[in-house]
Image (spheres, rainbow, N blue to C red):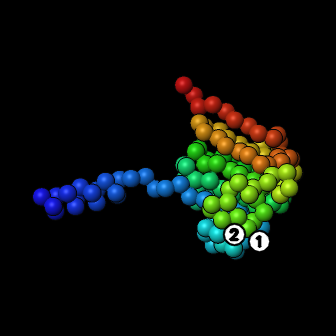
């Protein structure tokens, strides 16, 4: 009986969803994995590739020259100084730590959120590109 309970507990643990992660982006990061400011991804797109639904992407102040395609369920948050720990979200200050997404010269939307149902984009200045923000609903 105890072995059956152990196997059942192991199965339930393996079926539990992964906890949401904080993934960092900073032009000063080394691009390793985004787990800390020192190992932050250098582009927003690199962080998005590594993100899953429920994750938060924290972006250090600065100008990021890229157009992005949002990922469903991923929060993209600007306005960080680049020193905050996981517990210091409230230290974020978008007015002081400007985070700019700039796709100047690009003919695509700066932020595209096609076929996503949940989009959180906070603490950003968005400019350039073929338009600021484009969202097209799913058919049906």
Q: Is residue 116 above or below residue 65?
A: above
Vertically, is 61 above or below 71?
A: below
**Mark 1 lies on residue:** 28
Residue 92's x, y, as percent?
75, 55
Residue 58 visible (yes or no): yes
Disc sitting over residue 37 in the figure: 2
Task: Determine contact: label 1, label 2, CB under 8 Å.
Answer: yes
Viewer-closest of 137 and 53: 53
Residue 38 at x, y percent in the picture = 69, 73
Residue appearing at x 72%, y 71% in the figure: 29
**Between discs 1 and 2, the one toward the N terminus:** 1
Query: In the drawing, does residue 63 fall left or right of residue 43?
Result: right
125 or 87, nearer to the observer: 87
Q: Residue at x 81, y 41 (%)?
A: 132
Quarter of the figure that contains the N terminus: bottom left
Quarter in which the C terminus is drawn: top right
Q: How many marks?
A: 2
Under tag 2, what secondary structure? loop
Numbered mark located on residue 129 in the image: none
Residue 76 is left or right of residue 124, and the answer is left
Residue shown at 58%/53% (left/top)? Answer: 55
């Amino acid at each position: 009986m105890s072995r059956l309970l152990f196997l059942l507990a192991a199965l339930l643990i393996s079926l539990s969803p992964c906890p949401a992660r904080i993934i960092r982006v900073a032009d000063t990061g080394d691009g390793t994995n985004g787990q800390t400011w020192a190992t932050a991804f250098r582009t927003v797109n690199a962080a998005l590739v590594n993100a899953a639904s429920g994750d938060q992407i924290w972006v250090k102040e600065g100008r990021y020259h890229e157009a992005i395609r949002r990922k469903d369920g991923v929060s993209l948050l600007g306005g960080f100084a680049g020193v905050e720990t996981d517990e210091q979200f409230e230290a974020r200050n978008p007015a002081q730590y400007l985070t700019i997404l700039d796709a100047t010269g690009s003919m695509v939307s700066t932020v595209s959120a096609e076929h996503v149902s949940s989009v959180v984009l906070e603490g950003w200045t968005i400019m350039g590109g073929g338009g600021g923000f484009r969202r097209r609903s799913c058919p049906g």
